[in-house]
Amino acid sequence: MILEEYILKKTELVTKFAQKSKLWNEDIMIAKFNIVSACLSNYLPEISPSEHLRIFKNIFLHQQLSKFEQSFFELPDYIGYENLTTQIWSLLNKGASIICTFHTGSYRLINLFLAKNKIPFSLVVSKEMIAVEGDSLKEMYEMLNKLDNSHEGLKLIDAESPSSGLQMIKDLKQGRNLVIYVDGNVGAGNETINNNNSCEINFLHHKIFVRQGVGVLAHALQVPLVTVASYRKSINEIKLKFFDPIFSDVNLDRAQFTKKTMQEIYDLVAPIIIEYPDQWEAWLYLHKVTAPNGNDIIIALENTNLPDTNDKLRFNSSCFGIFKIVSDCFLFKKSNYKSYKISDAVYNLLVSSAFKPIPSSEVVLNEFAELYVNKVLVPA
């Protein structure tokens, strides 16, 4: 009965989401889409820009599904588990492990799975998450306790608090596991890219800066790291995939171990992100932890060679985006995540050339040379 109710309500959610056509025309959503499209272009360039909007929309669908599914306490009994070995079971039940997970698939189910199996843990989340959902999360786990007496007490740790590190150490020493969403870009201090507590690793076709507190804790306390990621093989088939644990290496100093470990954790989950890119929420904020890899817009010189008047041009959507915020128009360069204010006339031209190539003879703008030299407009 519970499973039937879940499927019915999930179908309703998916149907209602598909009907939200107006949502994607809002200025703020178009701006967000440009950022996600830029991240996809830089990290997964093999995906055609024509697929970016579909992926962008599905990110929000999977967000809603994940939040919806955390209230179905019986769901862990109906999902598939991969590589949940005896060794991993033993580590989780023993406690004092760091569970590293990602915002993929139904990413909140790892918490339900642990609670259902009477595995004590502390959840490390953002201050905003605690403020918005903290009370409801605790209420749900209290209800879970009433249902099957498995509730071990949900503890929430504010990842942005200066004392969060000490709290994590205390909980690990008390035998509690830590659940940390390593791709969440939250933690005490400045943004990850400017933080001394971060390190640069390779990720897909580019590089990112990641917080290294997970590796530091594991090395300092000699506790194991268990990586797990959720994904959907289909809308009705959810998986929780566990990976072989990582143990502290006494032959490496803390800095070496941390960088190596963070690289390994991301390498483990990268294939899931490649296969199911629309199930990874972090595309929405990946730009905050990446170093720009493109040059700024250049100014065209007077002797710039321009196309013949009979040549047709199109907007280069692979490298650029366009959007509006209220009455201001912007050109967005995907490689460096920078926005450039443009006139209404340029904006309208670029919109037109995005849908249908235009003859260069029709372009009478003063900015034409710069649009062409910077490859905003390219041969059709």
Image (cartoon, rainbow, N blue to C red):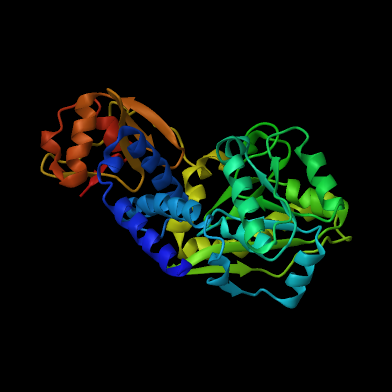
Q: Quadrant of residue 48?
A: bottom left
Residue that lies at the very extreme toward the right in this rendered image: 250
Would you place residue 6 above or below residue 358 in this image? below
Name the residue nearer the viewer: 262 or 377. 262
Residue at 53 percent across and 71 percent down: it is 79
Relative to 235, 213 lies left or right: right
Q: Position of residue 369 (x, y in %)?
A: 26, 31
Residue at 74 percent across and 71 percent down: it is 89
Q: Position of residue 244 (x, y in %)?
A: 71, 70
Name the residue nearer the viewer: 339 or 279. 279
Q: Position of residue 143 (x, y in %)?
A: 61, 53
Would you place residue 214 above or below residue 7 in this image? above
Residue that lies at the very extreme toward the front in this rendered image: 146
Q: Report if residue 298 is visible in the image.
A: no
Q: Report if residue 126 is visible in the image.
A: yes
Residue at 82 percent across and 52 percent down: it is 172
How many labels were placed on the picture?
Answer: 0
Image quadrant where one finds the N terminus: bottom left
Q: Position of residue 332 (x, y in %)?
A: 37, 35
Relative to 297, 129 lies left or right: right
Name the residue nearer the viewer: 366 or 335. 335
Relative to 299, 64 lies left or right: right
Q: Quadrant of residue 241?
A: bottom right
